[in-house]
Image: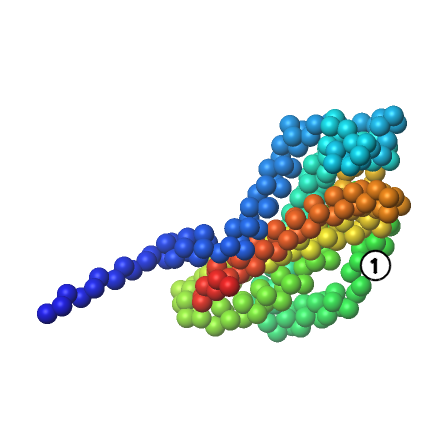
């Protein structure tokens, strides 16, 4: 008789690692985010010049690959003679700080409301659903501009306002997931054993929401970064001389036709950061899904 072929059974950890390192989009996105985070952390060591130092004799120098470029300023200088490469490097700190901060604020608001609405239902669900509808009906960018203008622009104000206006996705997903988890047998068993609603939420529901929350966080990170750049471009976000990619685009738009790098370079940085966050989020969604999609 022929011997039966042995079949290797993978553990859940091995399956997860296989999906993780086999997903090209996730690896590209995570690599981009990792590089940008490292640049932000070590900006003082990487930047060749002080991003705030001005030199009127070195105003509007082109990058080194353009005629008239100077190797002391690899990416040229802006209208105030500040090194463009150094400002781009320090701009990563602003974008990462605001992106993570705003996404975290939105997470705290949206997940809290979503779990309350999904678990308790009734009047709490109706009240939170009304709040969600009202939030979705508001013009987000215009409202953010008005609030920043009234309160006063600063990094912490931008983080708070962008976060307060970007919690709806968290709420919708966690509310639906909580309603589904609430009907499971292990939740009923915990309630029958005398667990309080707070204990059930923390020990039974939240662990099952964690993967979905992480995926939403990565998407909201990119949305928050774009929101900050939009506000800075319109003049109501990060104020000069703080290096912000959106502000750098706004400052360079007047000279974009004969010095396009003033707009193109921060635009490329912004694109890479947002596409990295989106690729990582899309990859996490595929990796953590039951079918383990890998397209």
Q: How many C-alpha atoms fall within 10 Å of the one at disc 1: few (<14), some, or many (≥20)?
A: few
On the image, the x and y values in percent for residue 293 come to: 48, 64
Label 1: which secondary element:
helix
Viewer can see residue 158? no
As drawn, the residue found furthest toward the left would be 1
For the image shown, how many numbered marks are present on the structure? 1
Write the residue at 45% across / 63% down.
292
198 versus 59 height, above or below: below
Query: Of residues 239 and 274, which is closer to you in this image?
Result: 274
262 versus 196 height, above or below: above
State which quadrant residue 217 falls in. Answer: bottom right
State which quadrant residue 106 falls in. Answer: bottom right
The residue indicated by pointer 1 is 142
Rendered-image quadrant of the N terminus: bottom left
Query: Of residues 212 and 184, which is closer to you in this image?
Result: 212
Write the residue at 65% across / 37% down.
40
On the image, the x and y values in percent for residue 166 come to: 70, 58
Write the residue at 79% across / 65% down.
138
Write the residue at 74% across / 33% down.
64
As drawn, the residue found furthest toward the front would be 67
On the image, the x and y values in percent for residue 274 come to: 66, 52
- Describe residue 205's horizontal placement relative to residue 192 as left or right: right
Viewer can see residue 194? yes
On the image, the x and y values in percent for residue 264 come to: 76, 46
- Describe residue 232's horizontal placement relative to residue 278 as left or right: right
């Amino acid at each position: 008789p022929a011997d039966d072929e042995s079949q290797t059974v993978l553990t859940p950890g091995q399956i997860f690692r296989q999906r993780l390192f086999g997903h090209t989009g996730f690896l590209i996105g995570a690599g981009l985010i990792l590089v940008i985070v490292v640049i932000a952390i070590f900006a003082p060591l990487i930047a060749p010049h002080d991003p705030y130092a001005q030199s009127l004799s070195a105003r509007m120098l082109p990058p080194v690959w353009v005629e008239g470029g100077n190797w002391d300023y690899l990416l040229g200088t802006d209208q105030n003679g500040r090194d463009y490469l150094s400002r781009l490097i320090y701009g990563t700190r602003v974008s990462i700080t605001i992106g993570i901060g705003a996404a975290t604020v939105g997470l705290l608001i949206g997940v809290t409301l979503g779990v309350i609405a999904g678990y308790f239902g009734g009047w709490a669900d109706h009240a939170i659903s009304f709040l969600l509808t009202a939030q979705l009906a508001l013009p987000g960018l215009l409202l953010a501009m008005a609030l920043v203008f009234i309160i006063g622009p600063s990094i912490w104000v931008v983080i708070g306002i962008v976060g307060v206006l970007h919690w709806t996705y968290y709420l919708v997903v966690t509310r639906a997931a909580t309603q589904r988890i609430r009907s499971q047998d292990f939740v009923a068993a915990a309630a029958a054993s005398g667990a309080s609603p707070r204990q059930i939420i923390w020990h039974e529901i939240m662990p099952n929401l964690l993967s979905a929350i992480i995926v939403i966080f990565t998407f909201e990170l990119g949305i928050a970064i774009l929101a900050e750049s939009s506000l800075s471009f319109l003049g109501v976000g990060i104020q000069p001389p703080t290096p912000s990619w959106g502000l750098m685009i706004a400052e360079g738009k007047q000279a974009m036709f004969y010095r396009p790098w003033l707009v193109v370079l921060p635009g490329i940085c912004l694109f890479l950061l947002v596409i990295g966050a989106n690729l990582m989020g899309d990859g996490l969604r595929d990796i953590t899904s039951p079918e383990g999609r890998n397209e």
